[in-house]
Image (cartoon, grey):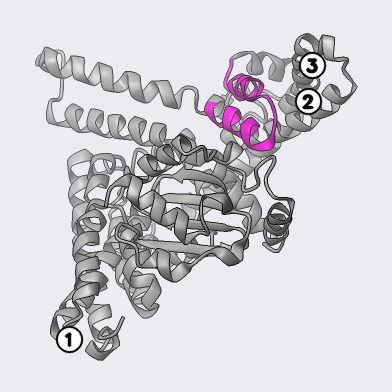
Amino acid sequence: MTIQELVQSILKGVGGRQNVITATNCMTRLRINVKDDGAIDEAALKGLEGVMGIVHDRVGYIEVVVGPGKCRKCSDYCKELGIPAAADGADMAVGGDWKANKAAMKAGQQENKLKSMLKTFGDIFVPLIPGVIAAGLCAGLNTLLGQLFPGTADSPAPAAVTMICAFLGLINTAFMTYLTAWAGYRAAEKFGGTPILGGMLGMITTLGGIDTISKLVGLYNETQPLDAILRAGRGGVLAAVIGVWFMCKIERAVRSKMPDALDIVFTPVITLIVTLVPYVLIVMPITGLISTGLVKLVGLVAMSTSPIVRAISGYLGAALFLPMVAMGMHHGLVALYSVQLETFSAVYLYPALAMAGAGQVGAALAIYLKCKKVGNNRLKSVITGALPAGILGVGEPLIYGVTLPMGKPFLTAGLGAGFGGAFVNLMQVASTTWGPSGLLGCFVMTAGPNGAVMSVAYFVIGLVISYIMGFLFTNLAIKPEEVANV
């Protein structure tokens, strides 16, 4: 089936082109906002060749899992058909059917405030993921090359290697240096403000002028600058996101009173000036304390000096990660990852969480053998197509096409993955970014105290452990007759 045929079939399954308000690319899923939720034919969508699963947990909104790369092509073709993407990731479109918008809004209000807040963080950072991954991969490769070709005064590294490392370093630095600016820009898009103003506020967070202000108001620590209540970078991305939310409210208030002829000149200036004082003197110190608390929390579990604590936290993290994803609670981890990356230049606990997908691979292999035994060729074909992606680290095809619909394997896979998570956390593996997992994650698992090569080796061992334990748990829990008619 071509991309065009797949999109046309998906549109038919959601009630036709006329029923679609927006269609948005979300890495592996096509997120579709519809006017009439009752027109969605879930059975037809699940039966489509190329569709790995669906998520339909809100009125007027459905996600169709088609896989990475293909999802972008599907959303591009939707644009060719005149279907817009959701503005700034929003679920409701301007000019859309008011009943559908009202239903979507009410459905969103039914979610608890914590879940909604965590999802907001996820929405802000999802468009940044390509940059996060690119920077992290470059940092990981840079570390590996540095260890494989150590340069000293007596024996410098080959010129070609030095050149490659310089370019890799540029890519990583380009993202990390301005991470708060990217976060501020995206936050302004999400909260309905002017993106460039959000980017400017985020960039101000890291400028040296913050230290000058801190000294003037007596909040700077000359002997231990990193312990200062206020300093450049204090609060990081948390400060940027919260500050931009506040800025967007001020911008709307200023614009509502500003004459149209003066808006473009005075609204941005007044907005930034009014925002900046409370941002620097209140938001940055408070979010700095929160960031420090998060860092200490990570230190108590993933970076604990106790091997037992590290192993337990790794097991629980890997075992519970995918249920957290299913409940939409994983978005809050983005803030934790970002704080760690800013503080340590590495992400702890993520390597353990990355084991969750490996557990799914092991579970799928167990189900495949049982399908072979009972002659379920349809499910066997689904697993065959999804396994390569799962091994590489793209888990959605296996999760939404195999384990989650069956229920029990989704849980046994997590229980098995926990053993891999315990191992990599025990060995203190850390990553240079978040996002890649499976075999593709090897290139970013180069941080931590063991050196890049050993960290990658420990990560691979963790994957193998998760494969084996996910297989064993699922093989014991699932009987052949349970897969006969799936």
Looking at the image, which residue is at 87% across and 17% down?
A: 258
Dots 3 and 1: beta carbons under 8 Å?
no
Q: Main secondary structure of the magenta part?
A: helix
The residue wearing badge 2 is 251
Q: Give the magenta range.
A: 182-207
| Mark 1 Cα-neighbour bin, 10 Å: few <14, some 14–19, many ≥20 | some
- The first of marks 1 and 2 along the sequence is 2
SS label for mark 1: helix
Q: Position of residue 343 (x, y in %)?
A: 48, 35
Nearer to us of marks 1 and 2 is: 1
Q: Amino acid at mark 1?
A: Val
Q: Is residue 184 above or below residue 387?
A: above
Q: Position of 439 compared to 249: left or right? A: left
SS label for mark 2: helix
The residue wearing badge 1 is 374
Q: Position of residue 101 (x, y in %)?
A: 70, 52
| Mark 2 Cα-neighbour bin, 10 Å: few <14, some 14–19, many ≥20 | many
Mark 1 to mark 2 CA distance (whole Å): 64 Å
Looking at the image, which residue is at 85% across and 23% down?
A: 254
Q: Which quadrant of the view contains residue 389? A: bottom left
Q: How many marks?
A: 3
What number is the disc on residue 252?
none
Q: Is residue 25 magenta?
A: no
The residue wearing badge 3 is 267
Q: Amino acid at mark 2?
A: Glu
Dots 2 and 3: beta carbons under 8 Å?
yes
